[in-house]
Image: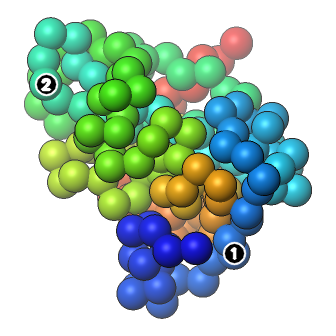
Amino acid sequence: MDTKITRLLEEKGIPYRLLPHSEPVFTVEAAAAQRGVVKEEMVKSILLREKGGRRYAMACLTGEDRLQTQAVREFLPGNWKRLTFATADEILQVTGTPQGAVAPLCLPPEVPVVFDRSILECRKVNTSSGHPLAGIELAMEDLLSLSGAVVGEIADPA
């Protein structure tokens, strides 16, 4: 499967495993089941939009963690207003990939990425490939390095 994300990984010589599935997935449970992996290694990539603005940021969490949007602002450069979830149309427009196939890779340079600290506990992670019918598995360090993410506590502690 050829996507801008798999091309990036190949160009950089980053080892990865393609995890195809039979239908598009939109939840951690469905993606883990289709890919045959544990949900604790799944990385959710959530595109956020600044309310009233035109800036976007990507927040990433593991498994079933819930995002604290207000916590993300602390790790973004500059002064950001309240963050809301991007729409499906915005996701496609900003990332070039449809909802459910987004990863924290190959994003426009003006879209900062924030990882929750829990991702650092994983040796390997699973994220989307940029195609609705496949995910990828790679080393956590490679995903962190390629994404240029900053790390902070953005998951709901409850």
Which residue shows up at 62% across the image and 46% down it? 43
Is residue 75 visible in this depiction of the protein? no
Residue 53 lies in quadrant:
top left
For this view, does 94 lie left or right of residue 59? left
Instruction: Reply above or below: 35 against 7.
Output: above
For this view, does 73 lie left or right of residue 120? left
Which numbered marker is on residue 17? Answer: 1
Instruction: Reply above or below: 124 against 77.
Output: below
Considering the image in quadrants, where does the C terminus appear? top right
Q: Residues within 10 Å of mark 1 (few under 14, many from 20)?
A: few
Give the amino acid at mark 1. Answer: Arg
Q: Secondary structure at mark 2?
A: loop
Give the amino acid at mark 2. Answer: Arg
How far apart, in angstroms, are the residues tagged by discs 2 and 1? 35 Å
- Find disc 2 in the rendering and name its residue: 54
Q: Disc 2 or 1, which lies upstream in sequence?
A: 1
Considering the image in quadrants, where does the N terminus appear? bottom right
x%, y% of residue 67?
Answer: 54, 22
Residue 113 lies in quadrant:
top left
